[in-house]
Amino acid sequence: MDFKSQLESTLSIERIRLLHLTANEAALRGFPLYIVGGSVRDLVLGRAVNDFDLTVEGDAIALARSLASRHGGKVTAHTNFGTAKWFLPKNLKTDVEAHGTLDIVSARSEFYKHAAALPTVEMGSIDDDILRRDFTINALALRLDGPHFGEIRDDLNGMEDLQKGVVRVLHSRSFIDDPTRIYRAVRYEGRYRFKIAEDTLALIPDARSLVEKLSPQRIRHELDLLLEEPNGVSMLARLDELDLLSPIHPALSNFNQSNLATLKSDDTALQNRQSRWILWLMHLTEQEIEFVNARLHFTADLSKMLRSASLFNANRTAVAGLKPSQYVELLEGYSLRVLETIYPVLANEEIKNKISKYLSEWRHVKPKTTGHDLKKRGLKPGPKYAEILRRLRAAWLDGEVKTKEEELRMLSNLIR
Ligand code: ATP
Ligand code: MG
C-alpha cells in the first residue's frame, strides 16, 4: 500500500497541509512523528478518519508550543501524561478536527501493576507505544516527519489482520491487564464485521472474573460506546453469546427473543444510546434497575428514565380501555422521553395508538379558562382551582365540551 498517496487521496487539502506543517515542526526538532492507532486503521480501510491520533517520539508539549508560536493558536497541556492540545488558529481549522483542535501525545510505555487497574504510564519509544495497544489492527503507526512521510510501522502484522478481518490481541495477558479490551474487541468485530481470532477468544474465560474489578465508569463507558454504534444491538447479542454481560450484572444477560426484537427497532430515532438503554432494560424490575445502576452508575437523568420505563412496563396491561382524560392522567406520571421511546415497539396496538395520541395531541390540550379567569370570577385561590381546571380539561379531552361557550356553561355549573 502506498500510504503517501492514500493520505493524499483520502484527506482534504487543508488536513494534509495541517499534517505537513506539524511534521515539519517535528522534523526541525528531530522528533519522529506518527499517526497511530485507529486513524491508521481507518485510513487503511478507506473509512473516514475523524481525529488524528498523533504520537511523537519526544516532547509533545514542546512541539505543540512551537507550532502555536509559529502558526498561532493556543496550547493546553498535561505535563503528567505528556499530552498537548493545540487549539488551531482560524486559518488552519478544518471542518473535521473536533472543536478545531489537534492532539499530540508523547510516545509512552505502560505497565499494569494490578489486573484490571489503570496502568502506570512512562515516557517511551514508539516501539513501547505500539506494544501497549489493544489489538494488532490498532497497533499500526504511520510516520510523517521529513523524508519519512508515509512510512508504515507494522511490527505486529496489523496490515495482514486488517486485510483478513481479524481482531487479535498482542499478547496473552492483554485481557487480564485490561478487561475493557474484551468489550472493545466485540465493538471492532461488529463495526467492521471482522472476527475475533480464535486464540484471542480463548483468552476471555481467564479474564471474565476480572470484569467485576472494573470501575462503574469504565465498564459503563464501554457499553455506552457500544450502544452508539449502528450495529450496537448485534454487539450486545454477541456479548451475551460470549457470556460477557452476566459478569457486569446477571440481570443484563439472557436476552430473550422479544427483548432483542424490541431493541432491534427499525425506527432510526430509537437507534441512539439513551433509547437503546431504555429499550434494553425496560424489561427489568425496578429493583433490578437499582442493582444495575449500583454497578454502572448511570447519569441521574438516565436512571430516572430507566425507573420510569420499568414501572411502565410492569403496569402496561392496566392501561387499556380508558377514556382519553384517564390516559392523560396516567401517562403524565411517566417520563416523556420514555413514552416516546417505548410506544413504537409496543405490541398492543390500542395502547400504542393511545400513547401516540397523548404525545402528539392530548398532552397539549388545555381549557380556555385560566386561574386568572377564576380569580376574576371572585373565586378564592386554593386547591379548588386545580380541580376545576382539571375537570374542564378532562371534558375537552373526552369530547364533553367542544366550544368555549360549552366550557363556560360547564364552568358555571362547577362553580355553583
Ligand atoms: P474508535 O474509532 O472507536 O475511536 P480508536 O482506535 O480510535 O477507535 P480510541 O478509543 O479512540 O480507539 O483509542 C485510540 C487508540 O488507543 C486505539 O486505536 C488503541 O491503539 C489505543 N487504545 C485505546 N484503548 C485502549 C486499551 N484499553 N488498551 C490498549 N490500547 C488502547
Ligand atoms: Mg478514536
Image (cartoon, rainbow, N blue to C red):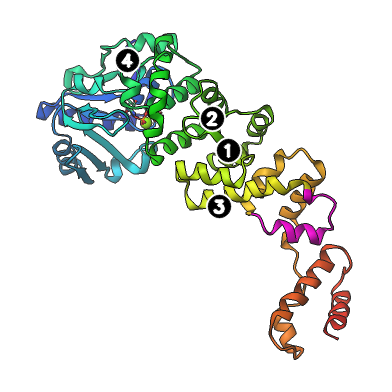
Q: CA distance from mark 4 to mark 3?
A: 41 Å
Q: Residue at x 66, y 36 (%)?
A: 267
Q: Which mark is residue 276?
A: 1
Q: Residues within 10 Å of mark 1 (few under 14, many from 20)?
A: many
Q: Residue 7 at x, y = what percent?
A: 33, 21
Magenta segment boundaries in residue numbering:
318-334
Q: Can the viewer see residue 49 in this picture?
A: no
Residue 239, placed above or below residue 221: above
Residue at image coords 30%, 41%: 101
Q: Nearer the viewer, mark 1 or mark 3?
A: 3
Circle 4 — which element? Answer: loop
**Looking at the image, is mark 1 or mark 3 earlier in the sequence?**
1
**Mark 3 residue type:** Lys
- Note whether ligand 1 is within 8 Å of mark 3: no
Disc 2 target residue: 232
Looking at the picture, does residue 388 appear above or below residue 243? Answer: below
Q: Amino acid at mark 2?
A: Gly
- Label 1 – label 3 distance at C-alpha: 15 Å
Q: Earlier in the sequence, mark 2 or mark 4?
A: 4
- The residue that disc 4 covers is 172
Q: Could you tell which of marks 3 and 2 lies nearer the N-terminus?
A: 2
Residue placed under numbered mark 3 in the picture: 304
* Image quadrant, ligand 2: top left
What distance separates the C-alpha of mark 2 from that of mark 1?
9 Å
Q: Please name which of the two marks, 2 or 4, marks the residue nearer to the observer.
A: 4
* Occupied quadrant, residue 41: top left
Question: Three-letter amino acid code at disc 1?
Answer: Arg
